[in-house]
Amino acid sequence: MKNETFSELKLFSFGNLLKKLGESIQREITEVCKNRDSRFDPKLFPVLYFLQKVEKSTVQKLADNLQITHPAVIQILNKLKELNLIETSPGLQDKRQTYSKLTEEGKELLNNWQELYSDIESVNKEIIEESGYDVFNMINSINNLLKQKNYKQRLDEKIKDRIMQQVEIITYNKKYREDFKQLNYEWLKQYFVVEPEDEKLLSNPDKFIIKKGGQIFFARLNNEIIGTCAAIKIDKYTYELSKMAVTEKAQGKQAGKKLALSVIGFAFSKGAKFVTLLTNKKLFAAINLYKQLGFEIEPEEVKSNYEREVFRMTLLLQ
């Protein structure tokens, strides 16, 4: 049962397993080192080694070269100073800079460490060779991948993709006409006011959208309509993404993105070359979504039937 549970959770616990392995190795190395000399602490060795190479160094230089944090370097330096293994002095040109260098005692300890250092390297090499894997190449590959896109970004994207898959997109049916109207009313009253142009489209979607060659899409989750968006035909080559509204309780469900993609896909299927939309500068989340989908802001001033201030964004399809 124990091994079965471990096997089931091994991918979930990937990061923890790496940490546990590192801590186990470090703990046993520390035990062997301290049996030889109480000052032999493997955590201190990289700083001592680097100071031997460069003679003296600032905290920042140590942090950059050893790839450890600034506070961690300071903590190690304080410990080394307490053990009388390093000494510090202000910079000659910049008194605000503090330089650390090895004391004679520090140099002696480091020399005594050389054989033990070689033994540790030898054991590590032996373990890696016996494993049959190029461990360092694997670790470097993982590090490089996480530099390109960190773990949080990857996990956020995976969660959003999963949630988006749960949202179902359906097309217009007269039984959803009231949903189209009420969702937009809810959204408009949150940010603006309902204007005559809004009322015209929301009260007569069949006449002003469907019969003119457009389409209205609805986002459905757990048999509940949570969002809507219209594709309004402007001309043979242009459709307008309009009247997008997602109920407040469904924010974060990726319904807006899926609705927008449905409008874009519909316009493309009709041979359109452009999808355009009108938006307002206060709608930060919506603007970011449109930019992610490839829409660009048009520089020209917009003449519209709305009293609220709007600007145009356009997506080139072909």
Image: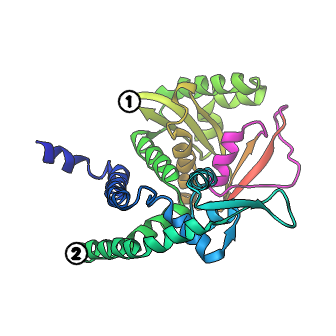
**Viewport quadrant of the N terminus:** top left
**Mark 1 secondary-structure assignment:** loop
Residue 285 lies in magenta, yes or no?
A: yes
Answer with left or right where residue 41 lies relative to residue 78: left
Residue 60 lies in magenta, yes or no?
A: no
Answer with left or right where residue 142 lies relative to residue 27: right
Residue holding disc 2: 130
Residue under the image location 32 percent in, 60 percent down: 32
Query: Is 285 located above or below residue 178 in the figure?
Result: below
Q: Residues within 10 Å of mark 1 (few under 14, many from 20)?
A: few
Q: Position of residue 23 (x, y in %)?
A: 36, 53
Q: Which residues are magenta?
A: 280-308
The one of 145 and 255 positioned closer to us in this rendering: 145
Q: First in sequence, mark 2 or 1: give its number.
A: 2
Residue 222's disc is 1
Q: Position of residue 196 (x, y in %)?
A: 77, 26
Instruction: Tell me the chief SS of the magenta region.
Output: loop
